[in-house]
Amino acid sequence: MAFPSTVLGARLFIVATPIGNLEDITFRAVRILSEVSLIAAEDTRKTKILLNKYEIRTPLTSYHKFNIRSKTDQLINEIEQGRNIALVSDAGMPAISDPGYELVRAAVERGIRVEPIPGASAAITALAASGLPTDEFHFIGFLPRKPGKKRKTLEGLRDLSATLIIYESPFRLLKTLAEIRETLGERQLAVCRELTKKFEEIIRGKAGEVLEKLKGRNIKGEVVVVAAGSGQAAQRESAS
């Protein structure tokens, strides 16, 4: 049964998609993507692969950081005219480290109902598998690229007791790990690469140990770095 396509009933769906393995999508997500009038995707080529697997024929339109200004108003107008729209990112939950929050904010400001469809998240998946404390965590996303801003950001995290979750490019990973070690010290880390994919790998250990394990390797794929918070090692030692 399709959702009512009326001005009062139309809404924006925030749909989580798999972070790797295409089977990690919910039944509800497949239904919603099949029933909406339009899917706004960060990368239509990647989303098309998912839609083809589940034989979803809903039209696609692009929504990314280069067309936010023009596309946000266009999509909001579409919803106000009675069309249900689903927002998806490259992978995981939209609006987390991608431009989706701009559309969500605009919908909220216009009184449009925003309905989240939960699912995979690289940050939470990595945290759960890291072996580090999960009761309190701080999500950073991608660190600044400029060295000065990057160091300043890391220095600001030094005294946080919460477990830290950082996204990083495989091309900058080794340099970032070295900077984490230099700024935060020999923290316990879990470097999670290619989560849910064929070559999934989780490397655990102190910063220096992890760097040694990765030295000389050609690192590929999406990476999440999970780092122990300030004092977590000492707390574990005193509790043992």
Image (tube, rainbow, N blue to C red):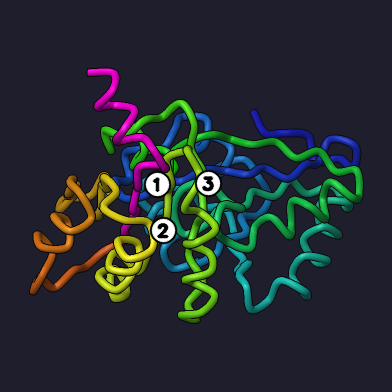
- Span colored in magenta: 222-240
Q: Which residue is mark 3?
A: 93
Say left or right for 78 vs 157. Answer: right
The answer to which of marks 2 and 1 sits earlier in the sequence is 1
Which element type, helix, strand or loop, lies under badge 3? loop
The answer to which of marks 3 and 1 sits earlier in the sequence is 3
Which element type, helix, strand or loop, lies under badge 2? strand
Image quarter in which the N terminus is found:
top right
Image quarter in which the C terminus is found:
top left
Q: In the current view of this chain or complex, which residue is farthest to the top?
A: 240
Label of residue 122 in the image: 1
Camera-near label (2 vs 1) is 2
Q: Are marks 2 and 1 in contact (CB under 8 Å)?
A: yes
Q: Which residue is mark 2?
A: 167
Mark 2–mark 1 Cα distance, whole angstroms, equals 9 Å
Image coordinates of residue 191 in percent, x first then y, are 25, 52
The answer to which of marks 3 and 2 sits earlier in the sequence is 3
Image point (67%, 33%), residue name: 2
Image coordinates of residue 119 in percent, x first then y, are 47, 36
| Mark 3 Cα-neighbour bin, 10 Å: few <14, some 14–19, many ≥20 | many
Image point (80%, 66%), residue name: 74
The amino acid type of the residue labelled 2 equals: Tyr
Which element type, helix, strand or loop, lies under badge 1? helix
Say left or right for 78 vs 191. Answer: right
